[in-house]
Image: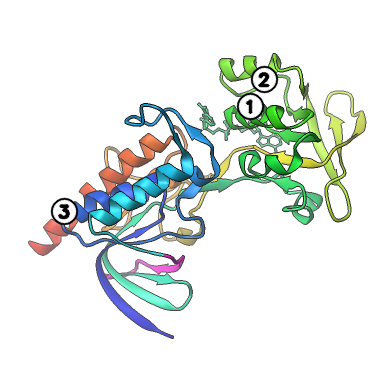
Amino acid sequence: MNETEKVHCLIIGSGPAGYTAAIYASRANLKPVLYQGMQPGGQLTITTEVENYPGYANGVMGPQMMVDFEQQAQRMGADIRWGMATKVDFSSRPLKVEIDEEKWIEADSVIIATGASAKWLGLESEQRLNGHGVSACAVCDGFFFKGQEVAIVGAGDTACEEALYLSKLCSTVHMLVRRDEMRASKVMQARVLKTPNIKVYWNSETVEVLGENKVSGLKIRNTQTGAEQEIPLSAFFVAIGHQPNSALFNGILDMDDQGYLITQSDSSRTNVAGVFACGDVQDKIYRQAVTAAGSGCMAALDAERYLGALEGE
Ligand code: NDP
């Protein structure tokens, strides 16, 4: 199949940034088409309760919040579709985006809201046992290890939050911190350190995840003494941060050394006219649902202005 379709405003990604861009673009009559990507709703679909999104006075579950965003965008008239952007050609106008390796969309403007994904340690054993006791989402998979011993690596707010979550389900949570201090906020650290069934291993790195077909233990090394030890356990959770989903734009859009798309100051404009970026793919500082939504709004307003100027040319 090799169809081509022409749209005014194409949005790639379906987290708070993408859906907010769709709401604003619909209301501005840009008739946006939004492709949801591999994980419709994005990272919030793998969280539990969100208590800090304004407007939800009693909190809301992350997956429900994204259903609410999607329904609002749909009600405004956004054309929301299942599908992945697989290639882009921004070398001429109209801009071109390939979907699912089979169909090209021509677009007058493109809003990129592809978010970020979990990072991995890069061990062979971690990859081999992924889905068999190795996971990057305690909230999704912790339930399967109820009453068992598990480990988590990382020392940021995510790792602390997930360790606390696991401590309510599992008998012991072994937490591996690679330095002699945690990066997490003081309040999260304090909660972790006073939880009796979370055991923190300072200056510790993961050597290998043990197990043939499922996780049976962990080999760790103390980076100060070089001493190694094995801990028998059933699951290994990785919570060491995220990387922006920007590989599609390598060599096409300006990005920093970590791959975050660079937008011009006080705007969502990228280095290609008509291409805008919002949400976690361009934000390594705040990374909150509410800031992603705010930047989605900015991208739609920038796209509207760009398209208005284009029509006046
Ligand atoms: P961070 O980048 O903040 O932390 C990543 C952690 O992983 C660091 O402790 C880092 O260690 C460790 N790490 C990285 N690579 C390795 C490795 N190869 N081996 C072992 N450890 C490693 O990511 P988070 O996902 O925790 O947080 C991202 C952002 O989201 C932060 O701004 C955070 O504050 C925010 N957030 C806020 C929450 C809240 O307020 N409730 C909840 C969750 C996240 P090192 O410190 O040594 O570099």
- Answer whether labels 2 and 1 touch (C-beta < 8 Å): yes
* Disc 1, SS: helix
The reply to whether the residue tagged 1 has its Cβ within 8 angstroms of ligand 1 is: yes
Mark 3 residue CB less than 8 A from any atom of ligand 1 = no
Which range is magenta?
A: 82-94
At horizontal 79% and vertical 34% (from top left) the residue drawn is 147
Residue appearing at x 89%, y 24% in the figure: 225
- The label on residue 192 is 2
Numbered badge on residue 28? 3
Q: How many marks overall? A: 3
State which quarter of the image contains the C terminus. bottom left
At x 89%, y 54%, the residue is 212
Q: Type of residue at label 3?
A: Ala
Quarter holding residue 26: bottom left
Which one is earlier in the sequence, the residue at label 1 or at label 3?
Answer: 3
Quadrant of picture, ligand 1: top right
Residue 214 in percent (x, y) is at 83, 51
Q: Secondary structure at mark 3?
A: loop
Gap in Å between the C-alphas at discs 2 and 1?
6 Å
Question: Mark 1 — residue?
Answer: 160
Of mark 3 and mark 2, the one earlier in the sequence is: 3
Q: Is any part of residue 262 visible from this angle?
A: no
List the single residue furthest toward the left.
Answer: 312
